[in-house]
Amino acid sequence: MVGPCTTIDFDSDGDGALSEEEILAAREARKAAILAQHDGDGDGELSDEERAAAREARAAEREARHAERVAQHDTDNDGELSEAERAAARAAREAERLAEFDADGSGDLDEEENAAARAARCAARDVEEEEEEGEEIVLALALSLDFIRGDVNRDQTVDIGDPVTLLNFLFLGGLAPPCMDAADSNDDGTIDLADSTATLTALFLGGTPLPEPSSPGGDSTLDDLSCDGIISTGF
């Protein structure tokens, strides 16, 4: 699930969820911000080194925020937050939210007050660690390379070579596809025989066209796959 701040920023139709188009808009906006910060050579793209630097910078930001939370709520000074300390931290934050946003003094936040509290926290980028994981989804999309669905061998076309490449990886110990998102031909979030079948069916049996993107673009589907261009050894 995409995090609350990204939803607030890009939910253009106000339905409380992000459509594929809104997710892609979030990805492009985050990518532009990353380019502005990390595109050292100004070529409009992130090299492997620049992409790695962006990830490292984000990891450092998260570690710094975590350290700040630990320093504030680690009452036994063991360097970590126990469940009791986390619960106390959540209670303290909830008390702060009530004090600031409980406009009617009811002792609880209604829907409108909750929305105001979330908007304020997102504006300050002061989100809980579990909420922050949702924001990482869009960061991962922004750092991913553009791809064509089914283009397993990354030659910018979808043909017989692509299912062959995937089958070689799955069953013959071949190299892993450099873009797992592209290899996920049926866009179900997993890489398996069904992906080669989907491509072959689309190519030769008049089957359903593969899901978007059909030209270089990003993946609007939220899953655990990425497209980082790194090639590794197969199983």
Image (spheres, helix red, strand yellow):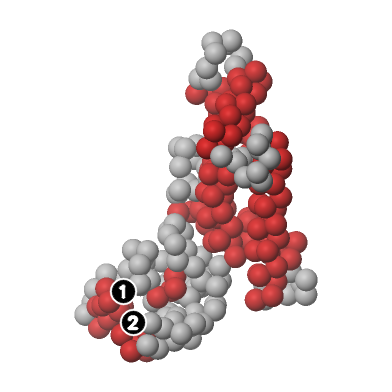
Find residue 95 and report its image quarter: top right
* Residue 134 drawn above or below residue 48: above
Could you give the CA–CA distance between mark 1 and mark 2, rounded to whole angstroms?
Answer: 7 Å
Find residue 31 and report its image quarter: bottom right
Structural crowding at the residue carrying mark 2, measured as other residues with C-alpha within 10 Å and reported as few (<14), some (14–19) or many (≥20): some
Amino acid type, callout 1: Asp
The residue at 41%/66% (across/down) is: 212
76, 139: nearer the viewer: 76
Q: Position of residue 154 (x, y in %)?
A: 48, 83
91, 214: nearer the viewer: 91
The residue furthest top is 105
**Residue at disc 1, secondary structure:** loop
The residue at 45%/37% (across/down) is: 15
The residue at 65%/76% (across/down) is: 48
Left or right of 197: which side holds 25? Answer: right
* Residue 62 drawn above or below residue 143: above
Q: Position of residue 213 (x, y in %)?
A: 44, 68
Q: Position of residue 234 (x, y in %)?
A: 41, 83
Residue 159 visible in this rendered orientation of the protein = no
Residue 62 visible in this rendered orientation of the protein = yes
Q: Does the residue at mark 1 contact the one at mark 2 (Cβ under 8 Å)?
A: yes
Left or right of 204: which side holds 184? Answer: right
Which quadrant would the C terminus be assigned to in this image? Answer: bottom left
Indicate which disc residue 192 carries: 1
Of the image marks 1 and 2, the number of the one nearer the N terminus? 2
**Residue at disc 2, secondary structure:** helix
Q: Which residue is mark 2?
A: 170
Q: Position of residue 199 (x, y in %)?
A: 31, 78
Q: How many marks?
A: 2
Amino acid type, callout 2: Leu
